[in-house]
Amino acid sequence: MEPWDVAYYSEKQRKALYDFDEEELRPYFPLDRAVEGLFETAHRLYGVRIEPNSKLPAWHPDVTCYDVRDEDGTFLASFYADFYPREEKRGGAWMNALRTGVSSGATHTPHLGLICANVTPPIGGKPALLTHQEVTTLFTSSGICCITA
């Protein structure tokens, strides 16, 4: 067995032992609901609201920009979300800063971040349905603590 075989055989073993197929969970995790859950988690943990910002330009029609605001509506940061794979996009999931914000005293320069994933895109007018692993990756790669800093 090679390292790249582990996920395949783990899934076969899980199916044999528990009759569990991760693909059967997809209908329970449409991307828009997973993102809503992510934003609600940020609200509960940090008291911030995340809302779409259609005013900032994006490099692809599938990319969405969001603003992060404090409970009182104070603008804290913005970030881009790029969820679907494309030929010119690298694989995997990650987040990084496009512009690092700074707070010192009464001045605040907002943070501009990016979260990327390569989840299964919507097909035939149906929503993108994620596996449990893709949902987990979305939550861990989003760096909620970083986009709200």
Image: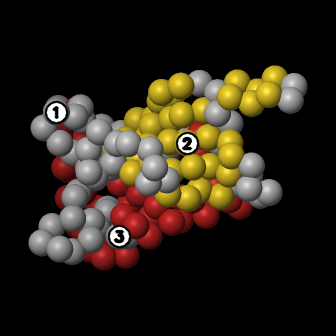
Q: Residue at x 62, y 40 (%)?
A: 77
Quarter-wise, where is residue 24 in the image? Answer: bottom left
Earlier residue among tags 1 and 3: 3
Other-residue count near label 3 (Cα within 10 Å), few / some / many at <14 / 14–19 / ≥20? some
Q: Are marks 1 and 2 in contact (CB under 8 Å)?
A: no
Q: Indicate which label's residue lies in the foreground, 1 or 3.
A: 1
Q: How is the image coloured?
A: secondary structure
Tag 1 residue: 88
Horizontal and vertical percent position of residue 18: 32, 71
Tag 3 residue: 30
Name the amino acid, label 1.
Glu
Numbered circle sitting on residue 78: 2
Earlier residue among tags 2 and 3: 3
Q: Residue at x 19, y 49 (%)?
A: 8
Name the amino acid, label 3.
Pro
> Is 137 above or below relative to 32?
above
In this picture, residue 149 sits left or right of residue 53: right
Q: Are marks 1 and 3 in contact (CB under 8 Å)?
A: no
Q: Residue at x 62, y 49 (%)?
A: 68
